[in-house]
Structure formats: structure tokens, C-alpha cells
Image: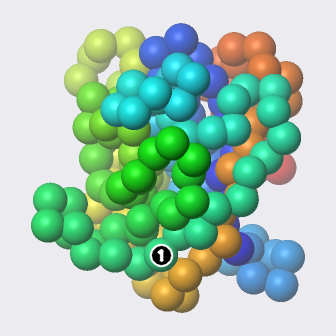
């Protein structure tokens, strides 16, 4: 099972994706998504909304003509073609989930970006079976949280 725990900010959604086997963490990475905007296509991260109960989807290995090997998140109401794919900047997401090794401001714009995205995606796909349950939720209250909370959640 994959779990995605997210922290929101006005410009982006940061998270930690964990792969669990027998309730033990086998592997993890950081994620980057668009900010919450009522599940608007190409404008928002996927549900649930901040402060709502977690939701479970299915993530299936997939080959996209545009993004190559990735995970396809299925069952997102009102949305389709949500992928977990490589990319470094929030502008690379288009409503999808990007994965990376760590957060840093790669381009000096004041926003957190993810590093080593292609390598991290390759590691994720190597650990995943054909289809994985993906549980998506939020860390703590719906209030906007600083990056330090995301990093603290990664070690807990």
C-alpha cells in the first residue's frame, strides 16, 4: 500500500509518499503537487480537500506516451489521467503528482522543488507491484503549514 501525506501552502502541495508492506515502511520519497483548488482539472491536487478524511485510490503501473513509465491514479472523481510521474517544479504537474528525493528551491523562485525525480520514480516503480492501493490524506490541521513540518513528518 502507498500512503501520501500532504501539507498545503498557497502555491503548492508538498507531501511524503510511503510504500508500506505488512504495515512497515519499505520505501519513501517526497512529492510535489498543485495547491488545493476544489479538484479543478489541471489547477488542483486531487481530493481529499484539506481537513477531509483520507481517500483511497488505485495506482497502476502505466506507460504514458508523454511521461514514459509512471503510475496511473485511478478512481479520482471528476478527474482522469492523474499520473505519478517525474518532474521537478510545480509547473510540471498539470494536476499530477511529482516524486523526488528531497525538497529544495532549484530555480530560486522561493518555491520548493523536488530533486532526482527520474531516479526517484524509477525506484518507486521498482518497489511497486502492478497495482497498489494509494491512500491520500493531509498531515495535521487544514491550516497552511511550513516546509519544516513536512520534513518532520518524513522522519516520524
Whether residue 49 is visible to the viewer of this picture, yes or no, is yes
Q: Residue furthest left?
A: 65
Q: Residue furthest front?
A: 78
Picture coordinates of residue 13, whole percent (x, y):
54, 30
Whether residue 151 is visible to the viewer of this picture, yes or no, is no
Horizontally, is 98 left or right of 92 in the view?
right
**Applied colour scheme:** rainbow
- Classify 44 as above or below 79: above
- Residue in the foreground of this view, choosing between 46 and 28: 46
- Residue in the foreground of this view, choosing between 81 and 151: 81
Element marked by disc 1: strand
Neighbourhood count class around disc 1 (C-alpha, 10 Å): few under 14, some 14–19, many 20 upward: many
Picture coordinates of residue 47, whole percent (x, y):
63, 39
Q: Residue placed at 53% from the left, 31% from the top?
A: 39
Image quadrant of residue 5?
Answer: top right
Quadrant including the N terminus: bottom right
Horizontally, is 42 left or right of 97 in the view?
left
Picture coordinates of residue 18, whole percent (x, y):
66, 62
Q: Residue placed at 24% from the left, 23% from the top?
A: 107
- Classify 156 as above or below 104: below
- Classify 3 as above or below 138: below
Residue where numbered disc 1 is placed: 60
Image quadrant of residue 125?
Answer: bottom left
Picture coordinates of residue 146, whole percent (x, y):
66, 18
Q: Residue placed at 44% from the left, 83% from the top?
A: 126
- Residue in the foreground of this view, choosing between 112 and 53: 53
How many callouts does the rendering have?
1
Q: Residue placed at 27% from the left, 16% from the top?
A: 108
- Residue in the foreground of this view, choosing between 132 and 125: 132
Amino acid at each position: 500500500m502507498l500512503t501520501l501525506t500532504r501539507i498545503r501552502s498557497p502555491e503548492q502541495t508538498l507531501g511524503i509518499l510511503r510504500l508500506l508492506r505488512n504495515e512497515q515502511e519499505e520505501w519513501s520519497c517526497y512529492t510535489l503537487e498543485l495547491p488545493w483548488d476544489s479538484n479543478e482539472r489541471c489547477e488542483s491536487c486531487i481530493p481529499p480537500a484539506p481537513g477531509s478524511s483520507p481517500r483511497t485510490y488505485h495506482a497502476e503501473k502505466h506507460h504514458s506516451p508523454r511521461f514514459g513509465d509512471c503510475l496511473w491514479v485511478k478512481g479520482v472523481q471528476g478527474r482522469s489521467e492523474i499520473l505519478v510521474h517525474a518532474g521537478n517544479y510545480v509547473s510540471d504537474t498539470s494536476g499530477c503528482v511529482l516524486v523526488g528525493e528531497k525538497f529544495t528551491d532549484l530555480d530560486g523562485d522561493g518555491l520548493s522543488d523536488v530533486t532526482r525525480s527520474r531516479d526517484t520514480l524509477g525506484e518507486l516503480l521498482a518497489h511497486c507491484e502492478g497495482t497498489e492501493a494509494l491512500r491520500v490524506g493531509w498531515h495535521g490541521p487544514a491550516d497552511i503549514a511550513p516546509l519544516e513540518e513536512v520534513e518532520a513528518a518524513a522522519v516520524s
